[in-house]
Amino acid sequence: MNRRELLACAASAAVVAILYPFDPSFVARAAAPVDSPITITKTDGTTVKGKITSYDREKVTMDVITKPKDPVVSTTISWDDIKKVSNGLTREKAIRKWKGEQHMHLCQSCFGDGKTFCPTCKGTAHDPASSAGCPTCKGAAQVACTTSKCKSGNLPCPNPKCLKLTDPGWYKRPDGSMWKKFTEKNGYREWSEHHCGEIIDKVNGEYTSLGECPDCGGVGSITDPACRGTSQMPCPVCLKKTTSPPCPDKCDAGIVTCATCKGSGVKF
């Protein structure tokens, strides 16, 4: 079992303190809202209206509304052809959510990206021989990731409502467990570290857990795009050597299709 699977199991543990009488309608109020029709504006200026049924790294699939009495038509639109989505969904957000939904099945070589740094040039897009004598990477063509908060190739989940130990406000109990309080009008509720990766938000004025965070799949972290989850990134000095010969493997700007998952982003 890998790190993400262990964290996901821990996040499923039911350990929460509710410091006032239980309200039987509390769970019902936490139900997810019904999806609403949206409009996609394409790069050619045309628009498509309907309901999104699924999305992944490459495309958006939606039930298109043509005429009120006509049946919906399932349509697939490539992200390359999308300029704007009316509900604010972007390709970056879609990929993040897709990874969250697939976190138990993501390829452990590319972490869902479907692509990795070229093993020959280490992402510099240059002949590795050109890195010889580089004072920054010492000829390795790569350096340790410099992204702030990157830990073992991962960043804290960007969703501000996702419970994370990297957020302020935690306190330790005598038994060593970590807890965080959320103050309300008539008291407060608190959640333990075992609920990290869950969305904690107000519903009718009361804080509740809305379940697994859709952005990180309940893990509480996402892959750092700078190092692609490897903790190593292309040497910034070698990247700027415009006169260096190109990578002999003819990679795409230092990036290649993941050899493990063949570009699918998921493990077989």
Image (spheres, helix red, strand yellow):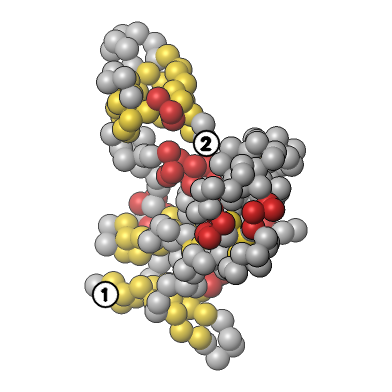
Camera-near label (2 vs 1) is 2
Q: Is residue 28 above or below residue 257?
A: below
> For the residue labelled by badge 2, is the local secondary structure a helix, a strand or a loop?
loop
Circle 1 residue: 186
Q: Position of residue 205 (x, y in %)?
A: 27, 62
Amino acid type of the residue that numbered disc 2 sits on in the rendered structure: Arg
Quadrant assignment for the C terminus: top right
Q: Is residue 62 above or below residue 222?
A: above
The one nearer the camera, 78 or 129, is 129
Q: Position of residue 29 (x, y in %)?
A: 35, 51
Residue 231, visible in the rendered structure: no
Mark pair 2, 1: CA separation: 44 Å
Residue at 43 percent of width and 43 percent of height: 92
Quadrant assignment for the N terminus: bottom right
The one nearer the camera, 108 or 225, is 225
Taking the view exactly as shown, the residue that stands out farthest to the bottom is: 174
Q: Is residue 103 left or right of 24 when viewed as pictured?
A: right
Q: Quadrant of residue 152 in the image?
A: bottom right
Task: Tell me the crowding category of disc 2: few under 14, some 14 to 19, or many 20 or more residues within 10 angstroms, Cα based.
Answer: many
Q: Which mark is residue 57?
A: 2
